[in-house]
Image: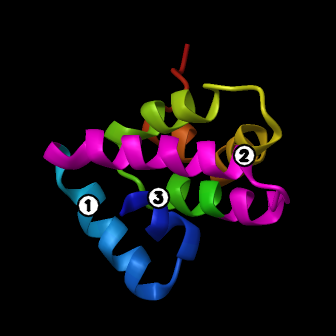
Amino acid sequence: MVADSLSGMSDENRSWLKLLMDNPASDDTLLDGLHLYLDRQAEARLLNTLKLQKCGEWLGNEAPARLQMRLMEAAKASQHAAHAAFREGLVASGGLERAYPKANI
């Protein structure tokens, strides 16, 4: 269900995913769905990097701080172009930097 919602990214899918991200008990479900989504995109005949970047950017902007590190780990799980495009979107969102700001030393 999560992988299908990430593929569609309609307004109702986004609302459902936001609700899912608000519940810490469903973090594993969300991440399992994300891995499935990235695996499906990696196996697709045509790689839509713009869609993957937009998905990564949206997740990076919307996900709470507790998920930012795990999202980046999922993006770095493979060196396939699908994971790289998703990772570019995550980096562009700046979510990881907002969740873990640099220390003032």
Residue position for label 1: 20
What's the residue type where badge 3 is placed? Ala
Mark 2 or 1, closer to the camera: 2
Q: Which tag is nearer the camera, tag 1 or tag 3? A: 3
Q: Please tell me whether mark 3 sits on a helix, a strand or a loop.
A: helix
Q: Tell me the tag on residue 43.
A: 2
How many angstroms separate mark 2 from mark 1 (CA)? 26 Å
Provide the residue span drawn in magenta.
25-54
Q: CA distance from mark 3 to mark 2?
A: 14 Å
Q: Tell which circle, 3 or 2, labels the residue nearer the N-terminal end.
A: 3
What residue did someone put label 3 on?
Answer: 3
Coloring scheme used: rainbow
Q: Is residue 94 visible?
A: no
Q: Main secondary structure of the magenta part?
A: helix
Q: Is residue 58 left or right of residue 29?
A: right
Pointer 2 or 1: first along the chain: 1
